Amino acid sequence: MKPVLIVGAGPVGAVCALALQQQGVAAQVLEAQPEDARVDTRTLALSHGSRQILERLGVWARLDGVTPIDRIHISQRGALGVARLSAEEVNVPALGYVLPYASLTAVLKRVLADAGIAVDYGVAVTRIESGSEMASLHAADGRVHAAPLVAVADGGRGEAAPKPKLERDYDQMAVVCEVQTELPHANQAFERFTPEGPAALLPKGDRYALVWTASREDAERIAALPDDAFLAALYRHFGGRQGLFLQASPRKTFPLKLAWTGSEAAARVVRIGNAAQTLHPVAGQGFNIGLRDAWELASLCGDTAAREIGSAAMLAAYTRGRRADVFGGLGFTDFLVRTFSNDIGLLRHARGLGLLALETLPPLKTFVARRMMFGARG
């Protein structure tokens, strides 16, 4: 049997390839970027559930620069209501983990090589054609690759990416950088809701990774501020729970939106990760849902007879199995953004009551924490 073809060698594609091999299913990965492409400087927030996936694949123990999140402090600016989540309360080693994207991709590249999984770099896919028995990938270099199943994990960047079925532009951008605070982070993360959008501080090494959400115009202005003015503005926006903000790395911005394309692509073709759905970064759901996409697809392939891998029945079962987790994540993040990113009086009071309930009702706290760690499987 021909190997499953995976388009995209990022974390979702790499995890899919490794999980398929663990299930006894051969995989081959095609990546548009050259092998020596510039290192991505993003920061990742991994859930406890994602750690479990990486542990099962032998990846977790090889990672460096991982900072655990032991506690999360949730509040809204200018209104009552605070909620605190802790790893101890839900009996896990940590609620989540923060690490550089480059660290994860470098380790995954080595693990793929050690596992003997073929990765062809610099292969841009220009067209995917479905068939009853095989799907065909047409590459920019003229080569054609055929497989009984193609998993598109290129983040939706490919030339053949379809238009999303559901799309919402939040008219927001995220300003991201690293900041040094006066007080040590003690492995506590903050999610601070404001009328302009949420601001998150994630412990990373001895610093914090900052995600500051604002309107497009404000985000560009904030990012361009000199360091002293930026740090002062951040203190006014976030408050003094960590003391003064002392240093900041260069700022970057990226637009925020919701986009759902769905996993169904065509016969013998399935989309996973950001190629299937893109979420607002609030609550850190998107990347973790993508890893669960990869893991669940590989698990289903392992449970399917070899001749049925990539069949319409198998892909329909995959879509049904992922629906609750994906739509739960989409709905949860969209609800948070739309409910908290305003200054409507009644909603402000309702938000305060909601945070109070989360703080005082252990079953609700456990439900929310497990949902953030494991998705619908929690």
Image (cartoon, rainbow, N blue to C red):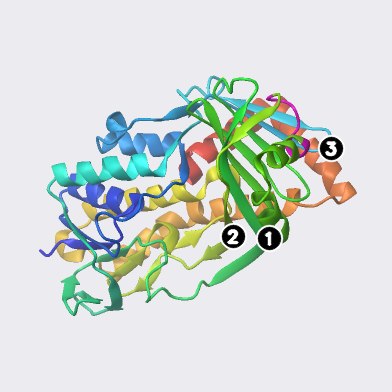
Crowding around mark 2 (Cα neighbors within 10 Å: few <14, some 14 to 19, many 20+) is some
For the residue pair 80 and 378, the one nearer the viewer reads as 80
Q: Provide the residue designation for mark 2.
A: 255
**Sequence-first tag of 2 and 1:** 1
**Sequence-first tag of 2 and 3:** 3
Residue 124 place in picture, x, y as percent: 28, 70
Crowding around mark 3 (Cα neighbors within 10 Å: few <14, some 14 to 19, many 20+) is few
Whether residues under marks 2 and 1 lie with C-beta atoms below 8 angstroms apart, the answer is yes
The magenta region covers 236-242
- On residue 216, the disc is 1
**Sequence-first tag of 3 and 1:** 3
> Does 54 sit left or right of 145 as displayed?
right
Q: CA distance from mark 2 to mark 1?
A: 8 Å
The quadrant where residue 231 appears: top right
Residue 240 within the segment the image draws in magenta: yes
Whether residues under marks 2 and 3 lie with C-beta atoms below 8 angstroms apart, the answer is no
Residue 99 place in picture, x, y as percent: 43, 36
> Does 355 sit left or right of 272 as displayed?
right
Tag 1's secondary structure? helix
For the residue pair 240 and 82, the one nearer the viewer reads as 240
